[in-house]
Amino acid sequence: MNSLLFLVLPLEFKGMGDSTITADVEAVAGDIEAMEIRGAATIADAAAQALRTQAEESEAASAGAFRTEMRAAARHLHDTRPTAVSLPNALRYVLQRMEGATVSELQANIRAAADEFCHRLDRAQEDLGEVGANRLRDGDVVMTHCHSTDALACVEAAVEQGKDLSAIVKETRPRNQGHITAEQLRELGVDVTLIVDSAARRYLDDADHVLVGADSIAADGSVINKIGTSGLAVNARERGVPIMVAAQTIKLHPATMTGHTVEIEMRDEQEVVSDEDRAEIGDIAVENPAFDVTPPRHVDAIVTERGQFPPESIVTLMRELFGQGPTEPWNEE
Ligand code: RUB
């Protein structure tokens, strides 16, 4: 898990109604929106820690005011990026433990919940890494897309088991998160070859696995991940290369059990083409979806801290963890 530096500012931001959102929550929300904090697990970790700081810095005069303040802070964080379900899952985990009759009791419970959540997140990543590593053999070549801390945990665990791995790393336009993957794999001692996205099919014949993370996993086993994942999976299927998705259970999207769909985030066109280039090209439309949906038939295994699942059976784990569907404690009165 990336360590996160928080900006502590003396200023406070007056939020909706009578609630007060701290500058720290504002800063974290801004960083998530701007992708200074990015990747589903890292976003979840940052959101839980931001709620902890909100609780600690609260000057609420009553338990009721404190609850209102916490919910407003959670809503503010919630609205930053729609696709990463780890974000509402993190907020739910912390807010569901907001129990107590006094402000200090509530603060202590939020602190404990946020700490427990972040600890579990780290632990889950380590555990899924062990599971994913069992799929990798000495000498294997993995092809990666984007940057996923869950996917890297599998490689790290395999390297710790003494396996020698190589990686073909897709640069992952438009923001080139593949560069982060390339650097971190190199630091693990993995031989890295960086390719442009459109070269993926050519190099699939050299790969033993496609290894990606997930922003969200739907009840039918569909994997929502960085744009380009589905095309890679289709090509890998055609080439007979197995596709492994590393995703902690925090990525499971409980609302999809009751028929909701996952919203795909559309980002700024300037990530794709500069204003200058756009003006030169002339009057065109630019689309920049951040994620896409890979259907379960193109995925071989979803690797979680609870073991490895064929995508079609992930719903059984979802039912066990979330019951029939999610709650939205940040919208409660
Ligand atoms: C990141 C991305 C990652 C998942 C999983 O997209 O698609 O594969 O979030 O990451 P973005 P992790 O850069 O737009 O946030 O395994 O670290 O949770």
Image (tube, grey):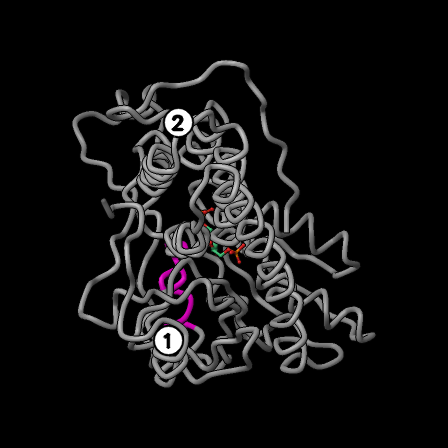
Q: Quadrant of residue 121?
A: bottom right
Q: Is residue 308 above or below residue 228?
A: below
Q: Amino acid at mark 1?
A: Met
Q: Residue at x 62, y 38 (%)?
A: 4
Looking at the rendering, the stretch of residues picked out in magenta corresponds to: 224-235
Percent position of residue 5, x then y:
63, 32
Whether label 2 lies within 8 Å of ligand 1 gets the answer no
Which of the labelled discs sits on residue 21, or is there none? 2
Q: Mark 2 is on which residue type?
A: Ile
Percent position of residue 152, x then y: 63, 61
Nearer the observer: mark 2 or 1; the answer is 2
Report helix, strand or loop for mark 2.
strand
**Residue lying farthest to the top in this orientation:** 11
Q: Secondary structure at mark 1?
A: helix
- Looking at marks 2 and 1 on the same chain, the residue that comes earlier in the sequence is marked by 2
- Residue located 73% across and 73% down the image: 158
Residue 231 part of the magenta segment: yes
How packed mark 1 is, by other alpha carbons closer than 10 Å (few <14, some 14-19, many 20 or more), is many
* Residue at x-position 64% and y-position 64%: 123
Q: Is residue 69 above or below residue 114?
A: above
Residue receiving disc 1 = 318
Which corner quadrant holds the C terminus?
top left
Let me know if residue 189 appears in the view: yes
Using the image as rendered, state which of residue 83 and residue 322 is in the foreground: 322
Mark 2–mark 1 distance (CA, rounded to whole Å): 32 Å
Label 1 near ligand 1 (CB < 8 Å): no
Which residue is nearer to you in this view: 199 or 159?
A: 159
